[in-house]
């Protein structure tokens, strides 16, 4: 997990917490928007983390093959 992904999860937690506290304290449903934004941020962070893990897995499986083909010219 890189720094940007950690920041995305931190932002998610902050936005969801701010939305929940704002909704509870004021009783105004407008803070549901914060919860939705936090949810969208969480989905984006989760998808990014999956893509990062998939890229790392692929790089390990391709380590056995050379990046450039060997020159077999006589």
Image (cartoon, rainbow, N blue to C red):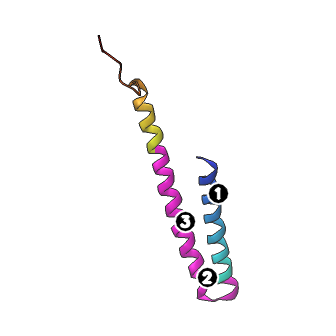
Mark 3 neighbour density, 10 Å: few (under 14) some (14–19) many (20 or more): many
Query: Residue 57 got which mark?
Result: none
Left or right, residue 3 beside residue 65: right
Give x and y (percent) for residue 70: 36, 19
In front: 69, or 16?
A: 69
For the residue labelled by badge 1, is the local secondary structure a helix, a strand or a loop? helix
Marker count (numbered): 3
N-terminal-most mark, 2 or 1 = 1
Mark 2 neighbour density, 10 Å: few (under 14) some (14–19) many (20 or more): some
Q: Quadrant of the C terminus?
A: top left
Left or right, residue 26 beside residue 60: right
Give x and y (percent) for residue 60: 45, 32
In the displayed structure, would residue 9 be above or below residue 68?
A: below
N-terminal-most mark, 3 or 1 = 1
N-terminal-most mark, 3 or 2 = 2
Q: CA distance from mark 3 to mark 2?
A: 16 Å
Query: Residue 41 got which mark?
Result: 3
Q: Which residues are magenta?
A: 24-53
> Which residue is tagged 1?
7
For the stretch drawn in magenta, the main secondary structure is: helix
In front of the other: label 2 or label 1?
1
> Which residue is tagged 2?
31
Give x and y (percent) for residue 33: 57, 80
């Amino acid at each position: 997990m890189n720094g940007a992904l950690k920041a995305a999860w931190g932002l998610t937690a902050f936005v969801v917490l701010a939305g929940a506290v704002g909704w509870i304290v004021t009783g105004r449903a407008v803070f549901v928007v914060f919860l939705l934004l936090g949810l969208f941020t969480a989905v984006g962070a989760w998808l990014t983390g999956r893509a990062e893990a998939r890229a790392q897995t692929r790089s390990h499986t391709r380590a056995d093959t050379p990046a450039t083909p060997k020159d077999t010219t006589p």
